Amino acid sequence: MQDIKLNGTVFYRMLRRGLEVLEENRAAVDALNVFPVPDGDTGTNMVLTMRSAVKEMEKSGSDSLSELVAAVSLGSLMGARGNSGVILSQLLRGMAKNLGGKEEASGLELAQALQLGVKTAYKAVMKPVEGTILTVSREAAEGALRAAKKKATLKEILDAALICGEESLVHTPDLLSVLKKAGVVDAGGKGFILILRGAREALGFLEEGLLDSETAEPDRSKSLPPTDRQSVALSLPDTASGIIPKTGEIPYLYCTEVMVRGSNLPLNTLRKEMVDMGDGDSLLVVGTEQVAKVHVHTNHPGRVMEICLKFGTLHQVKVDNMQEQHREMVELGLVTDPSAKETNNPQKNEANDVNAVTEPLLPAVLVEPVAKKIGLVAVAMGSGIAKILRSLGVEQIVEGGQTMNPSIEELVQAVNRIPVSQVMILPNNSNIILAAEQAAAIIEKEVRVVPTRSLAQAIGALVAFDPDQSLEENFQAMLNGSKQVKSGEVTFAVRDSQIGEMEIKANQVIGLAEGEIKVVGDEPAAVVKDLLAQIVDEDDELISLFYGEEVESEQVKKLEEELKERFPDCEVECHLGGQSLYYYLISVE
């Protein structure tokens, strides 16, 4: 039987099937959480990252391997969510770099691409930890390379990768004690194996003649449906996602998009001519030397087409009346918050085979002018928490938290919406820090990430912010400020578990201090009191509670009075946080 060659169609089908298998098992991957708290989101983050990669391939309208790997590189980067999603995006970007410029690849070249993907992923992590997706992908890639050197077929190479990867996954608890204690394997590694398994299944379908690898176009008739928070945003043009304050305040009426195809496309020159046109905002020029995507808001779409025609042929031309779209969204109830974010505007990718140049959004459309020289972006879950952060000077709030990490693209867009050249990002969750750092690396502005892991740390950092100080001085001050507060969380257990000597049953209330489970009980208020008894010491002066959407105000009032009696030397404040899943978020300082 003749070996299948890795061309664009085969590559698309491999990744598409990989996504499908991952999505079919998403809940199982999410459940592989080392703690029984309701924030298992590794499977979700990897699905959304893969969805972005596959959607970018579909948007390209191409069956060229070189163009599809470039699309995957861009899509996975901008759609990456959480630590697992960012690492997955780096695996894909490294692979894309190795396959760039090829229209057909051998099994050996695929194995080498897997190797480069692993190297890229390791470099992206400041302190790589073995026993994670990094180990699983590395050992899978090593297995693939050994098979490729023995002249194995493409299918046999993936078989070898799967065997080595699955064996590696089984041994992840031996390398990471926290996995062994929880009795689980690494969730990211499991997700990677599922993607690999799907890719292998696609090759099986092709080999059995169920699909044609040479002549059939990739089946894009069944476009990927939106999922979770992206359900509206991914199905609408980027300008219809709620960022326009009022229908009458749209200075540039038409959202204009066009794909330009040619040879040796000069992206910088194309961008300059678009800027010199002097009519529009939200300019985006992204692509390769063969294909470029142009996006701009303008009152003269015809001028955009004329400029693009100088450089190549036009494809996938799309012009939308944003005023009409916004009115429709309001009528449908899909747009209610003027500060809602854009979710579908790709930004810059620094991979060698993908170049992107962006023009920052003009402030007159999106935000009120600000006097200070440093902008602030923060991630928050819950309308009450967002309001509190805004009161402390944050201009842009990115929705997200424990169970729905924002993508790199969303963080990039938030930074670009602030009309200053220096910006601080506060991720406020340990699983968002890596994505924030990747966003900072691809933005033309000067961006620093204060590695806040909780709301409490964010408040400590923001209190230390001084608009008259430099970016570096503020970074150090905010870093120190974030360390001056203690944080706690009260939520519920999603499964039975044993943490040290604590036996936890599903649905019991649990209290965490600095991310570690300290208290187990049956009632949120009681757990708050027991948790604070372990956190508060004689030097503390302020206890702040941020209660979630499921907590009644009467319960909060009663708890507040009890805490004032129990901790008479501390001031007690209670605020509506509005967060889901967590009864209370706690700050002590």
Image: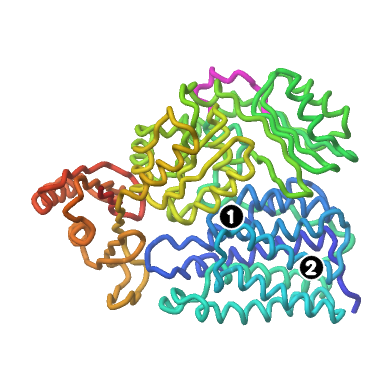
Instruction: State the image quarter where residue 262 is shown.
Output: top right
Residue at point 70%, 33% (across, down): 284
Q: Tell me where residue 230 appears, x and y as whole percent.
A: 55, 47
Residue 48 badge: 1
The mark nearer the N terminus, 2 or 1, is: 1
Q: In this rendering, would 114 be left or right of 565?
A: right
Helix, strand or loop at label 2? It is: helix
Magenta segment includes 209? no
Q: Tell me where residue 525 appears, x and y as whole percent.
A: 19, 56
Amino acid type of disc 2?
Answer: Gln
* 575 w.r.t. 375: above or below: below
Observer-side mark, 2 or 1, equals 2
Are discs 2 and 1 less than 8 Å apart at CB?
A: no
Residue 112 badge: 2
Q: Tell me where residue 279 appears, x and y as whole percent.
A: 70, 18
Q: Tell me where residue 87 appears, x and y as whole percent.
A: 61, 60
Instruction: State the image quarter where residue 532 is shown.
Output: bottom left
Label 2: how many Cα within 10 Å (few below 14, some 14–19, many 20+): many
Residue at point 48%, 56% (across, down): 431
> Which region is colored magenta?
244-255
